Amino acid sequence: MDWEHARYLMVEQQIRPWDVLDGKVLERLMLVKREDFVPADKKELAFVDVALPLGNGNFMLEPKLEARLVQDVELKPTDKVLVIGAGTGYVVALAAGLAREVIGVEIDVALKHVAEANLLRAGVKNARVEEGNGLSAANVACPFDAIIVTGSLAEVPAVLREQLAEGGRLIAVVGELPIMSAVLLKRSGNSYAQNKLFEFNLPRLRSAADKDAFVF
């Protein structure tokens, strides 16, 4: 397979039409080799517009959604970023090229090791992955300028809002089926403004409190 051509088509046919137009984000999508972040037996599907199963109930998000989350959280070169649900490390790698420091949290220890190996192979030096439940308590490295949540939540919990620095942003998919929405939450002092960005149904974050929901 011509991986570079396939990557170009992914960006032009899937990601740009989904309103991902930030030049720095598009450049990062071309630089990070997504095929190296998918399981070896699914490498041929690296650029397909589907969520890829990773085993143990885990999934890798659609490329267009990963790109949109990274773009819409408005990363800056000085930002410290938290990615809850690091998965195989792809979103962490994308963010690492746009921010000062990225910390991923992954509840699945096997996936944590996969993400670490992938980031090392990709030469990402300003990111790390920690094992843990991203919703159970404040991360010791907080506050964060940006937080990206890769699974859905019923609502944004206080434990996440309070980890934002002044002016910090959090992006997550929230709500209940049949309609969920991606929202961008911004902190100003002790106030939080939340804006709806787009509709998208996403499985529950594995560590989310709603145990009856479909999780990953």
Image: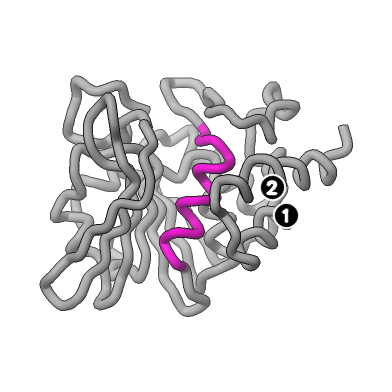
Question: Which x, y percent locates residue 17?
Answer: 61, 46
Quadrant into which the C terminus falls: top left
Question: Which x, y percent locates residue 50?
Answer: 57, 28
On the image, numbered disc 2 is attached to which residue? 11
Residue 92 visible (yes or no): yes
Please give left or right for residue 16 compared with residue 214 in the image.
right
Quadrant position of residue 107: top left
Query: Which residue does the image show at 32% across and 26% down from the upper left?
Result: 215
Magenta span includes 98: no
At label 2, which amino acid type do we have? Val
Cβ–Cβ below 8 Å for labels 2 and 1? yes
- Residue range highlighted in magenta: 60-74
Of badges 2 and 1, nearer the viewer stands 2
At label 1, which amino acid type do we have? Met
Up-down: is 119 above or below 213?
Answer: below
On the image, numbered disc 1 is attached to which residue? 30
Question: Which x, y percent locates residue 28?
Answer: 66, 60
Magenta span includes 73: yes
Q: Secondary structure at mark 2?
A: helix
Up-down: is 105 above or below 168?
Answer: above
Please give left or right for residue 80 compared with residue 159 in the image.
right
Please tell me how crowded label 2 is: few (under 14), some (14-19), or many (20+) other residues with Cα within 10 Å.
Answer: many
